[in-house]
Image (tube, rainbow, N blue to C red):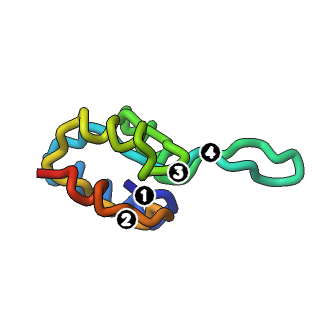
């Protein structure tokens, strides 16, 4: 989980280590510039270039987001500058 450019080296290190990355969670695309074009986060762009599945929930603590993450049955969730406060129920999901 992450958003800004400086989260990319952490994801790259995990990929280089040979660990399985089932998906990446990042902030939703945000309007940018005068035209208010939707721009994906740097981490989302990088993850898509690596052909990883990317999810962009509005709120990580919403019931829908929690159910999605539970369905992945993660052993570990790596968080690097995600930009949202994670609830206790979220933090209890990984094994």
Instruction: Identify the residue shown where x is 21% and y is 56%.
Output: 92
Specify few, some or many for label 1: CA neighbours under 10 Å numbering under 14, 14-19, or 20 or more: many
Q: Earlier in the sequence, mark 2 or mark 3?
A: 3
Numbered disc 3: secondary structure: loop
State how far apart marks 3 and 4 are (Cα): 7 Å
Image position, residue 80 (x, y; %): 37, 65
Residue 27, disc? 3
Looking at the image, residue 25 sits to the left or right of residue 16; the answer is right
Instruction: Identify the residue shown where x is 44% and y is 37%.
Output: 48
Instruction: Identify the residue shown where x is 88% and y is 52%.
Output: 34
Image position, residue 13 (x, y; %): 25, 59
Looking at the image, residue 10 lies above or below residue 44:
below
Q: Earlier in the sequence, mark 4 or mark 2?
A: 4
The residue that mark 2 highlights is: 80
Numbered disc 1: secondary structure: loop
**Toward which corner of the image does residue 47 lie, by quadrant?**
top left
The residue that mark 4 highlights is: 29
Image position, residue 49 (x, y; %): 44, 38
- Visible in this render: residue 16? no
Specify few, some or many for label 2: CA neighbours under 10 Å numbering under 14, 14-19, or 20 or more: some
Numbered disc 4: secondary structure: loop
Question: Could you tell me if the residues under marks 2 and 1 are in contact, i.e. CB atoms within 8 Å?
Answer: yes
Q: Earlier in the sequence, mark 2 or mark 1?
A: 1
């Amino acid at each position: 989980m992450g958003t800004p450019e400086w989260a990319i080296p952490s994801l790259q290190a995990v990929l280089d280590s040979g660990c399985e990355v089932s998906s990446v969670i990042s902030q939703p695309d945000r309007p940018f510039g005068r035209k208010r074009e939707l721009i994906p986060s740097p981490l989302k762009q990088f993850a898509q270039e690596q052909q990883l599945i990317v999810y962009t929930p509005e709120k990580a603590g919403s019931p829908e987001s929690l159910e999605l993450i539970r369905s992945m049955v993660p052993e570990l969730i790596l968080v690097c500058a995600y930009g949202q406060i994670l609830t206790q129920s979220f933090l209890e999901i990984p094994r």
